[in-house]
Amino acid sequence: MRFSVVTAFPDFVEAYFKTSVIGKAVQKGLIECDVVNPRMFAEPPHNQIDDYAYGGGGMVLKAEPLARAVDFVKSPAAKVICLSPQGRLLNQALVESLATEQHLILVCGHYEGVDERFIQAYADMEVSVGDYVLTGGELPALIVVDAVSRRVEGVVGKSSAVEDDSFAKGMLDHPHYTRPSVWRGLKVPEVLLNGDHGAVASWRRRESIARTLSRRPDIVGNAFLAPYIEKGVYLIWGDASRVLGDEAGLPEEVVIKFLKNIISVSERAGCRKVILLLKEAAIRQKIRILLSRLAKLEAECDEYAEMIKVVPNMDRAVSWIKEKEKSSPYMVAITSENKANRIHWDELKMRILGFCRPVAFCYQCKAEDMVGVCLRNPLGVNDSGDIFSGIISVAVTLERIIGLEKKEVPIGRDR
Ligand code: 4GX
């Protein structure tokens, strides 16, 4: 990965490239950093790189010296980024996306800014590091170099790289402590001293959640929740006889495909079980036999049989979850009907993090069975309750609520 910084103050940027983690990464050859001064490409004898703004105002960087500097460092795959308060706000998702590039050319503006024609002709993207005004683009450029570099393999140690996954999940970090265990009368939380790894993990999860909900509720909408849900997530497919019963007439391979799909969708969202409501004993038996046959036939289907549970009705599903989790599930119906207890998916995410209860997503369940909240069915009124509609509705809903592990933002000209 290569970074080229175009700046009228090369000393400042060069010092950073020789220091600390970035300096070591340069030494090890993990990243390549160069600096180019537009003044070297300015018109002699004055080598002026700025001039008065047309229409009045302060000074503006001239387009030609910047253009020549960029041409000088350019490589075929280079992306040109201009640092500016008018740019796209930098966040971890954009950092991950920039980390996939081979060469970033970072152009640092000064004064009132840069001649707009340079940006138009050369910049692939304008990036801002925050909603405040600085004196120049050097610090923002170094912020980009720093954040992107630590996503390059080998630049930071494995533990910090793994730690970083927590930001990929989009939640705030938990507090950290080191020795001594009592400092000026302040104690380290007891749970961290006992060596119970499970208890530590669960404490850290709760701390991350509490901090995120109170300090940064705005990021919860995009967070990947699966690692933060202590009690299980369940999917209950009501009236499954309609799709799996004999009258549905589905060939066995379609039933198998359905089971596989619904399991993989549920597993990705961290579901503990998929519970099928099948009122006829004969069909429950048929599905059980099919699952155990699958387990014998294909090694990977071993877990498939474990993931699926068949019960006759909702009461049995709810009491089974309650028994297993020692607390009653929060019921969430996926429905096309306009119910009074409908909530927004964003609000549901907040609630799931706020309590420590199992959550049961219910698809095709009878109204009288549903006492919790309702979520809008992503298929709308077009959901006919068949296996195709069901998998789509369930997959979109689970992905919306639980989220995606990684977020990719495409890079390119964004205006
Ligand atoms: N995130 N500044 C750039 C001059 C400027 C203005 C417009 C290009 C276009 C900043 C930030 C930031 C101050 C750096 C103005 N250059 N850059 N400079 N916040 O405040 O990136």
Image: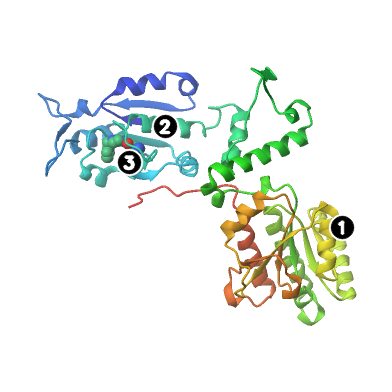
Which element is circle 2 on?
helix
Tell me residue 148's x, y (percent): 47, 34
Q: Mark 2 points at which residue?
A: 143
Task: Kindly identify the amino acid type of the residue bearing the numbered disc 1.
Answer: Lys
Task: Check contact, mark 2 vs mark 3: CB within 8 A.
Answer: no
Which element is circle 3 on?
strand
**Spatial CA span between label 2 and label 3:** 14 Å
Task: Kindly identify the amino acid type of the residue bearing the numbered disc 2.
Answer: Ile
**Spatial CA span between label 1 and label 2:** 54 Å
Residue 95: mark in rendering = none
Please indicate, yes or no, whether residue 203 appears anywhere in the rendered image: yes
User: Does 218 sit left or right of 83 as displayed?
Assistant: right
Residue 206 sits above or below residue 410 on the image:
above
- Of 402 and 80, nearer the camera is 402
Residue 85: mark in rendering = 3
User: Which one is closest to the eye, mark 1 or mark 3?
Assistant: 3
User: Does 221 sit left or right of 367 as displayed?
Assistant: left
Work out whether mark 1 precedes mark 2 in sequence or the reverse, and give the earlier one: 2
User: Does 296 sit left or right of 215 as displayed?
Assistant: right
Residue 296: mark in rendering = 1
User: Which one is closest to the eye, mark 1 or mark 2?
Assistant: 2
User: Does 286 sit left or right of 7 as displayed?
Assistant: right
